[in-house]
Amino acid sequence: MSITRAYELEGMKRISDVVAQTLRAMIDYATPGMSTLQLDQFGAQMLRNAGANSAPYKTYKFPGYTCISVGNEFCHGIPTGSRILREGDLINIDVSAELNGYWSDNGASFVLGKDIHGHMALVNASKEILRHAVDSIRDGVRISHIGHIIESEAKKRGYKVIKNLTGHGIGRSLHEAPSHIANYRDFFNKQRFQKNGVVAIETFISTTSNYAVTLKDGWTMVGNNGGFMAQHEHTLVVTDKEPLILTGKNQIWN
């Protein structure tokens, strides 16, 4: 989506506030002993209260309203009553939704309670790398350059990136052009960020895997070489200076 009118920006701000506040509240609400279904229902109620529609449910009939991945699950985890959260779990929540024809997307990985399994370094790396990437986005910058930043920063910290999960354009639907904002330097991608374009920028930082593979449930993805992954995501508007972060209320950098 390219924003050309003030009302379009206001529409994007409203839905971005909804998904950001829902993500933040879900992170704060998560407790050891709770099922991922309970956590998803909490988030679903927040979306309903705001008049918003779950994007994965509306678009793909995903069997949940938010994606909640735990432990070695990389993304697209299905909320269930049998998956119980434990102290020290690495959890990823991805919240995307639609309101009045506008769509926004954000996500975050975090450690539940005490970091007894040593996941916090990975989580912090993902946050820091997202900030590096976002700070470098301007009108005219090559999309592949942002991928190079993400991959380089991951390598500096001893991590890998997932090459088949990417950021994307967003706004009037969940996934729009540019459809492939990779976490590595894609030499074949000659596209550039354009002023007023709306994009969802995501990190996919992994301990041992370079690709995500889908499990038999048809949704949940794990690493091709195992390990763990952390993801953080903001929806933003490209400008000729620093980008306008629409999902800042998720507080993932606080």
Image: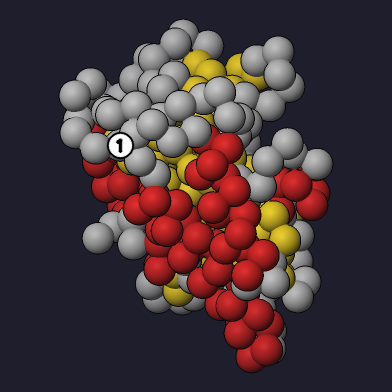
Question: Residue placed at 34% from the left, 20% from the top?
Answer: 207
**Residue 114: horizontal and vertical position, in percent?**
19, 33
Relative to 114, 214 lies left or right = right
51 lies left or right of 73: right
Q: Is residue 157 left or right of residue 188?
A: left
For the image, the number of numbered tags is 1
Report which residue position mark 1 lands on. 112
Q: Is residue 202 visible?
A: no
Tell me the residue at 68%/41% (across/down): 64
Amino acid, disc 1: Leu
Snapshot colouring = secondary structure
135 to 149, vertically: above or below: below
Q: Position of residue 150 (x, y in %)?
A: 38, 40
* Residue 56 in the image: above or below residue 237: above
Would you place residue 120 above or below residue 210 in this image? below
Where, by quadrant of the figure, is residue 32 drawn? top left
Local packing at callout 1 (Cα closer than 10 Å; few below 14, some 14-19, many 20+) is: many
- Choose between 169 and 29: the one closer to the eye: 29
Quadrant containing the C terminus is bottom left
Task: Look at the image and tell me in which quarter the N terminus lies.
Answer: bottom right
Q: Is residue 97 left or right of residue 203?
A: right
Q: Which element carries disc 1, helix, strand or loop? A: loop
Residue 61 visible in rendering: yes
In the rendered image, residue 102, in percent from the top left (x then y), is placed at 71, 70
Q: Nearer the viewer, residue 44 or 206?
A: 44
As displayed, is residue 59 above or below residue 9? above
Location of residue 227 in the rendering, given as x and y in whole percent from the top left corner: 39, 15
Residue farthest along the top direction in this orientation: 225
Instruction: Give the residue at x 55% y 54%.
Output: 43
Q: Residue at x 57, y 63 (%)?
A: 46
Q: Is 134 in front, or is 48?
A: 48
